[in-house]
Image (cartoon, rainbow, N blue to C red):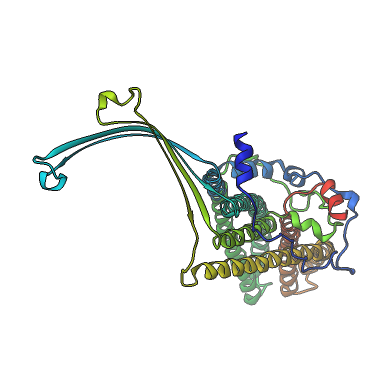
Amino acid sequence: MGSSLILALTGCSMIPEYERPASPVADGWSQGETYQAASAEQLAPPVWQSFFRDPQLRQLIDVALENNRDLRVAALNVEATRALYRIQRADRFPSLSADAGGSRTRTPSDLNGAAQSGITSQYNATLGVAWEVDLFGRVGSLQQQALEEYLATEAAQRSVQVSLIASVANTYLLWQADQALLQATQDTLQTYEDSLRLTQRSFDVGIASSLELTQARTAVETARSSLARYTRLIAEDRNALALLLGQRIPVLPAEQPQLGTALLAELPVGLPSDVMLQRPDILQAEYQLRGANANIGAARAAFFPSISLTANAGSASSQLSGLFDSGSEYWSFSPSISLPIFNAGRLQANLNYAEVIRDVRVAEYEKAIQVAFSEVANGLAARETYVDQVAAQQRLLNASEDYFQIAERRYRIGVDSYLTLLDAQRQLFSARQQLITDQLNQLTSEVDLFRALGGGWTSQTAQAAND
């Protein structure tokens, strides 16, 4: 009965009817040879564990989700906005309080009209109720705004989580790539040092020239310089990964995965662009838009009267010992109404401000969709082109190995100069480095596409987007 009365007295709402802004992007992805989309039947489970196949990487992501400080701050922000919502929600209900007090007052004789001064006493114990009757929806609008802000913060937490997963994966892949580049540099340095020893012996017997000896030494020192650089980069990668994890990197198996292996599952990209609306950052922007829309309702309601009901009931007596005696009952009922008449345009300015903020949130929501569409489109463009690029680079590496073997045999039998052998060595080293770099770029582009798609999807989501 009481709750029904509250709902009856909290009448209308002046929140404008919400309409989701039209998507400022196309209904589908770009078409052409660059964009080879998978079919909708290739949907994967909506969990990141199924996308990242490397168990070591999954272990690191689990650690980061447990200990990363940015994610912890985002979770605390959710708790904070949840508490603010509960505070705002409480304003819709009556507040009940119990109060007790007493006073003794001495009044001089020339003030009380008596021949002598007097002392009066008053004691009371009351139960009070105060309530703002939300006839025009001001309190309800503020509650709705607080709810939307809470939901926006919750979506922001999910966005931080998806970004964290992608950052850990990309940093881990970069770490693996730098280790592969270090190994390639060590192998190349060994080859250069073998060539230097051979050239030194040939120089000592007068076969090789001082120019060839200098070229061999230059190649060795260049490789040593690269070795030092990749050693430094690996240390920096570990430090960056430890920062993301929020603790020291756990002990991992000595055998590391190869970049060329299937570390990632295939992403389902044959989906309509409406699927992006489930991205956490887009959901956050829409919740903020809804909150701004609700704030307009509160600004509109401020133009109308506010009604407050205050009541107290209890006991009052001039003697503390008689506070609860028969006949000491006390009550009061104080309804009040306040109607704004003149405020120098403050209420209108407040409404104008709320409407402008709503327009700002619309623009932010549309921009979030445009950024998401661009990121997914870039990911689709990178998918097939990197496949072709890595395949071509692998063929170039195979050709460079053949070139090096032929050049080495021809140099040893004296058919070609050392300059040809040195060129073959450098080309082979460059081809190995570029292949590792291309493999890294291919994998990180897939991780970025995973993040751009929101970090999770289901076949039901795709079906809902198509309906």
User: Residue, x 69% and y 55% (percent of image)?
Assistant: 283
422 or 84, which is in the foreground? 84
Extreme residue in the left direction: 115
Residue 433 rendering spot, x and y as whole percentages: 71, 63
Residue 63 rendering spot, x and y as whole percentages: 60, 41
Residue 66 rendering spot, x and y as whole percentages: 58, 41
Q: Can residue 450 be spotted in the picture?
A: no
Q: In this view, does 146 lie above or below 210?
A: above
Q: What is the number of callouts on the image?
A: 0
318 or 4, which is in the foreground? 318
Q: In this view, does 439 lie above or below 261?
A: below
Name the side, left or right, on which 73 lies relative to 365: left
User: Residue, x 54% and y 60% (percent of image)?
Assistant: 302
Name the side, left or right, on which 14 lies relative to 228: right
Q: In this view, does 237 lie above or below 253?
A: below
User: Residue, x 84% and y 63% (percent of image)?
Assistant: 384
Q: Can residue 118 be spotted in the picture?
A: yes
User: Residue, x 77% and y 62% (percent of image)?
Assistant: 376
